[in-house]
Image (cartoon, coloured by chain):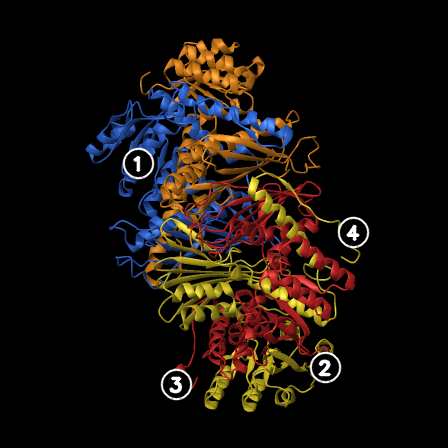
Chain colours: A blue, B orange, C red, D yellow
Amino acid sequence: MSDNTDLRIAVLGVGMMGADHVARITDRISGARVTVINDYLTEKAEQVAATVPGARVVADPLEAIAADDVDAVVLATPGPTHEKQLLACLEAGKPVMCEKPLTTDAATSLEIVKREAELGRKLIQVGFMRRFDAEYEQLKAAIVGGELGQPLVMHCAHRNPAVPPYFDSAMIVKDSIVHEVDVTRFLFAEEIISVQVIRPTANSLSGTDLQDPQIAIFTTETGRHVDVEAFVTTGLAYEVRTEVVGELGSAMIGLDVGLVRKTRPGVWGGTITPDFRVRFGAAYDAEIQRWVHAVRSGAETGNYVDGPGAWDGYAAAAVCEAGVRSLETGERVTVDMVDRASIPGA
Amino acid sequence: MSDNTDLRIAVLGVGMMGADHVARITDRISGARVTVINDYLTEKAEQVAATVPGARVVADPLEAIAADDVDAVVLATPGPTHEKQLLACLEAGKPVMCEKPLTTDAATSLEIVKREAELGRKLIQVGFMRRFDAEYEQLKAAIVGGELGQPLVMHCAHRNPAVPPYFDSAMIVKDSIVHEVDVTRFLFAEEIISVQVIRPTANSLSGTDLQDPQIAIFTTETGRHVDVEAFVTTGLAYEVRTEVVGELGSAMIGLDVGLVRKTRPGVWGGTITPDFRVRFGAAYDAEIQRWVHAVRSGAETGNYVDGPGAWDGYAAAAVCEAGVRSLETGERVTVDMVDRASIPGA
Amino acid sequence: MSDNTDLRIAVLGVGMMGADHVARITDRISGARVTVINDYLTEKAEQVAATVPGARVVADPLEAIAADDVDAVVLATPGPTHEKQLLACLEAGKPVMCEKPLTTDAATSLEIVKREAELGRKLIQVGFMRRFDAEYEQLKAAIVGGELGQPLVMHCAHRNPAVPPYFDSAMIVKDSIVHEVDVTRFLFAEEIISVQVIRPTANSLSGTDLQDPQIAIFTTETGRHVDVEAFVTTGLAYEVRTEVVGELGSAMIGLDVGLVRKTRPGVWGGTITPDFRVRFGAAYDAEIQRWVHAVRSGAETGNYVDGPGAWDGYAAAAVCEAGVRSLETGERVTVDMVDRASIPGA
Amino acid sequence: MSDNTDLRIAVLGVGMMGADHVARITDRISGARVTVINDYLTEKAEQVAATVPGARVVADPLEAIAADDVDAVVLATPGPTHEKQLLACLEAGKPVMCEKPLTTDAATSLEIVKREAELGRKLIQVGFMRRFDAEYEQLKAAIVGGELGQPLVMHCAHRNPAVPPYFDSAMIVKDSIVHEVDVTRFLFAEEIISVQVIRPTANSLSGTDLQDPQIAIFTTETGRHVDVEAFVTTGLAYEVRTEVVGELGSAMIGLDVGLVRKTRPGVWGGTITPDFRVRFGAAYDAEIQRWVHAVRSGAETGNYVDGPGAWDGYAAAAVCEAGVRSLETGERVTVDMVDRASIPGA
């Protein structure tokens, strides 16, 4: 594959997550495009494919994996199908980004690990997306950089407003707490050796018979303690909070205020951005992405459709000229600007 | 241009901002690629072009604008060249995303406005990127949605740690305060009619003879008051804070804690995310983008290079199985996991 | 006056502030008691005096000041009476704590200053209570201690939910902004040399014809800039915010989060308490004060009336004994506690 | 005891806490004074008594309790002496405020409970001061008021920078975690039925062999879950954080930002003060208390010693007069003020 050719991706499963990945690859990601879409509901696959220029539907997942116009695979199918599909990816030698879970149990997951190891080449990535979150990256950096000292304890809260009707108590472990399992392994870089799940009084307002909330307690190989409150029927919002307590200090993310450190006597502190490219980096991305989309769609740009136009540039220049004059005297200066209505089309 | 063909962009000027835009379009933005690069320093243009597959250098800016393989232009050249280059874009009928300022004075800016109006088609967007910032969008929404009532007053602070040696006192108005000029016009949707620039005691530690800080005061058409503290030699960080005070409440952004509202008696509040796609949207983008880059570069994926691999999926499954067993009893359960070293290549 | 005798105080004027001072001296302050109460409404004075053991009403304010059983005076009468009453205090040689304003205009205030200066002894304190607020004290300390460097600019916001019907636009200056006048002089330790009051669009929801909000701008002797937003009909809450911007950093109080500093690159920070006596100092005061009041009133103490009782001490001991046993094993230990109902009267 | 006579208190034990209580009663509390001081180190008692007008030393604690000039007792002696001294207080019928622990074990505590119950009159209060802390009171109110719904889970962190050399692992339970025992019982108004203490990797930097941190888990009568991180050698600061998670929302105190609620979808919020008497209540107390102390000590008041003086009142009046003139025109007005040096003694 030459460097300026897009990676051609098959997306298998276009439910909520899969459709989200299709939109992501099509609208926001550089260097890739979706060429093949598969879903066990062909109609669903057709609907999504209709939004992606150049994408076709392939009804059979294994055929989609094997297709010539597919360089790599995104797997967003239900968990029970993962094993077979992952094995097909390995056989075809195609990189695969697999939404969690890898498979539905440890035994079959281990089989996947062994098969990939025999291949001698890593082809599988699992969708633990928190590792790519800016706050978790900061927290990891605070640990790796030594700022917190040796970590001893971690407190996690993981709250959802609601869950779908089929969600059961075991899924709180396998679908919700599993993220904290990976966060623990990612941040502490060691394995978890024991788990305890405590069952407090259940939320009587959930309209379910779930054991919710649950408190999970992990012990790691070196004896670190992790506790996780999972509460999936709060009725409020999505909250993910993680605090690491180390020998030199503590740091917490998920307070809606970025990473907050306590690493010096008597002071708590957050982070302020070093420069405008960090502060407004996402704004620059959005500015250019929306402009590209507008231009490609043949829309007028400028303030009629998206973003500030020439008039805004003129108005800013007129105000700044008045400002520079005021800077000389300190007195109020009236802005000299033409009437916009006097320029038809402006 | 067919829908699945990338927009071909010429970037003129590849100093800090221009080079940033080249990287953005090449590495992070969907649907566009840089085909032509221009800079008055040809060597600089060559350096940047070497990082972009398929991009070529064109030494003359007007020739770059006119080139057949250019659908649209990003202008990041010095301000004094903008007028001529914008006119060339208008003449060629090519959309242009022009970094601020539109031109260096109000008179020439007005000429651009008029020329574009004569064309009958908006082709120019100006780089006031704050309009694309999530916090400013929230603030705009709080105003438009009526949550704050009629806005009466706005307080702004705009602080930089340092400025380059050529920065003079008038540039604090034209390069820094100009952003608050646009923010005022964007948020209040009306023009500024007078400006006053107050000169407090200057910062003696700046190592410059700048009038810094400066306090700018704007009055808008309907009599609203805006004050701006511009302080560009704080030595600390980049801080942009904006508070709108309305008849029903106030809201502030830039406190490093997202938008904070005061719109009900006795309570102040921030915003928490409604669901995981909002909370982790950027993480999902980064996850897929990095995976695409890794695959395209021929790198192994999984935990060796980038992101969690099959072993991580297995480990999570093993821990969750223990968790589900503990959920039944409330007792601590030991995790059953094979030794990773027993699987060569895992 | 011997050291263990209470200071005997006359309170003149027992409207909202004066009555508050009477309660303060009677219920919360050590070393003083109110012996004489005066108000131009004698009935009001009688009502308040009825709540203070040992206090009597004196109908004439000058007689109250002169009384033998009065060592010092608190003046909470309307401003126009202050001049005469202050002169009486000076003549009697009695210390006086005078609610703002000193007098109603600068000329008569100057007369008071001169008369006290002639006496050669300071007897007057003015009720600018912000100087005694913990946050302002921290802000003053941050300035005096050099942490912020030389202060250059100060931003203030002063918001009230509502004002009484007789409040007029000039009172926003004289009754509200006057606090920021004193804060400026207190924090910067220099005089204000000019004032500008800007009139933004007025709040149409105030139900008044006030010019509200107002923006006051002060310049100090050394050229520092202070701006004050006074907005007294917000309908929301009482907010007092003050930010000092210095050559080395900035600090803000009134964000409902204590003092927040920005004095190091890339970090913002608040203050955490060094020890439990600071954190819980006010709780200890309240604990003992309420216990004293309960005992003096003949009430039973302990958990029936106020504060934890013997049962709470026993329950804590029983839980801790179980905890110490669990500490040895890490296992859950059942708490061994008698049934409270088995002890009548417990 | 008549209403305007001070309560006469014996303080037993004048180590850190006891001496603090002596100062509190003498300098800040209304309606009480210390008449008798006792310590097993007579010299220590003498030192403290020397700072309190009218206090005498009594060498024997039981004699101090029985003394005629003692109406009530504050017990700040070592725990092992409490039982005997509490019984003496009960026998004498004197109210006693007893620092925790009530006694050193549950069995003797139960004896005290029974003896007091037999008396038929509550005389004992235990020093769980958090019940008097404004933030815990707010948290209790949020529970009692139903804002959080039925509480299900509570997370606590209790961190000290350091502990004295004699502190052992069991004391972390009995001296630190005991506060969370009482907080649980206070907030949830039910008993704790089991305790588990988990021992994570210990802090290797503590310079001790303490099991520190410890994680305590409480289960209450109705099945609520409480976890407590106690970490007494952080080297940083004193931190006490408590979060209650209920069926309708959660609230946290101890984030250095007051109580923060999450009780509505998508919003988190803190509390802002309704009026100036709440916001500046403590400042008013301090203002009057310091003025009383200054006057009693014969010091000059006003700006020479403590608080603003007549000159400050004059300066404020002069600035406000200029402000009122500017209010009419919007223009800058120079302040007219005499030179302070022209008034000797001002």
Q: Are marks 4 and 1 on the same chain?
A: no
Query: Which residue has dot 1 on it?
Result: A18
- In the picture of the structure, the residue carrying the numbered disc 2 is D42
Q: Are marks 3 and 4 in contact (CB under 8 Å)?
A: no
The foreground one among C207 and D90 is: C207
User: Which residue sits at x=53%, y=67%?
Assistant: C15
Q: Depth-wise, is mark 3 or mark 4 nearer the camera?
A: 4
Where residue B227 sits, quadrant-wise, is top right
A166 lies above or below D209: above
Indicate the position of residue D245 as horizontal and vertical percent values. 40, 59
Instruction: Please name the amino acid that badge 4 sits on.
Output: Ala
Where in the figure is residue D23, as x and y percent of width and height? 66, 73
Q: Which residue is mark 3?
A: C342
Count of numbered labels shown in the rendering:
4
Residue in view at x 37 percent, y 63 percent: D152
SS at badge 1: helix
Q: How many other residues sit within 10 Å of disc 3, few (<14), some (14-19) or many (≥20)?
A: few
Q: Secondary structure at mark 3?
A: helix
Q: Which residue in the protein does label 4 denote? A: D341
From the image, state whether disc 3 or disc 1 is nearer to you.
Answer: 3
Which corner quadrant of the image does residue A133 belong to? Answer: top left
Residues behind callouts 2 and 4 on a single chain: yes
Q: To which chain does the residue with label 3 belong?
A: C
Would you place residue D250 above or below residue A14 in this image? below
Sequence-first disc among 2 and 4: 2
Q: Chain of mark 4?
A: D
